[in-house]
Image (cartoon, rainbow, N blue to C red):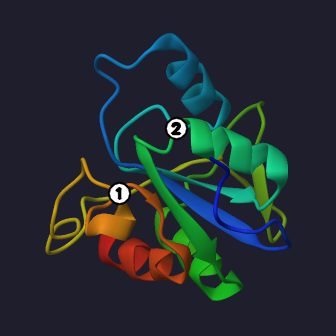
Amino acid sequence: MAPQEKTGKGKLAVVLVRGMVKVVQPVKETLAMLNLHRKNHCVVIENTSTYQGMLFKVKDYVTWGEIDDGTFQELVQKRGQLLEGRGKALEVNGKKYKRYFALNSPRKGFDRKGIKDPFSKGGTLGYRGEKMKDLLKRML
């Protein structure tokens, strides 16, 4: 079963929805490669086939979807943490930020069925497309 979204230009926002307790080692390693170490942390990645394979592997723990530049700028402005010292960074407007964003729990909660069901069946997990912007605005 292949990921359902198509490869193309643009950015994907990925949010870790479930905790890391009792997670098998390959999934932990993939989440570490995505820089997702804590619940309600978000990363912004490019929409490539490599990242889509990683997302398909961790689909039972994260939710993701496309975001536009306006949402990305709002995310950096409200939740971006400046990086002090060395390390890999996210560069926006000449400033270096940490590569993840620590978000709040969403106002009015996650979706109706909670964090254990896929988005296509009324839950939170997996690919949510353009509706990712709505979730991020509730989490800012």
Question: In this image, 104 relative to 103: left or right?
Answer: left
Instruction: Give the image quarter of residue 67.
Output: bottom right
Question: In this image, 140 relative to 109: left or right?
Answer: right
Give the foreground label among 2 and 1. 1
In front: 107, or 125? Answer: 125
Instruction: Give the image quarter of residue 95.
Output: bottom right
Q: Position of residue 66 (x, y in %)?
A: 62, 74
Q: Is residue 76 in view? A: no
Give the residue type at disc 2.
Val
Name which residue lies at 24% across and 51% down: 115
How many angstroms separate mark 2 from mark 1 (CA)? 12 Å
Q: Which mark is residue 118?
A: 1
Q: Position of residue 33 (x, y in %)?
A: 67, 30
Question: In this image, 38 relative to 129: left or right?
Answer: left
In front: 75, or 31? Answer: 31
45 shown above or below 32 = below
**Farthest residue, direction top:** 25
Q: Is residue 106 in view? A: yes
Name which residue lies at 62% across and 47% down: 1
Question: In this image, 128 relative to 12: left or right?
Answer: left
In the rendered image, the quadrant that contains the C terminus is bottom left
**Farthest residue, direction bottom:** 70
Q: Earlier in the sequence, mark 2 or mark 1?
A: 2
Residue corresponding to mark 2: 58
**Farthest residue, direction front:** 1
Under circle 1, the secondary element is loop
Name which residue lies at 34% across and 48% down: 17
22 shown above or below 109 = above
Under circle 2, the secondary element is loop
Q: Position of residue 42 (x, y in %)?
A: 50, 53
Give the residue type at disc 1.
Pro
**Neighbours of disc 2 within 10 Å: few (<14), some (14-19), many (20+):** some
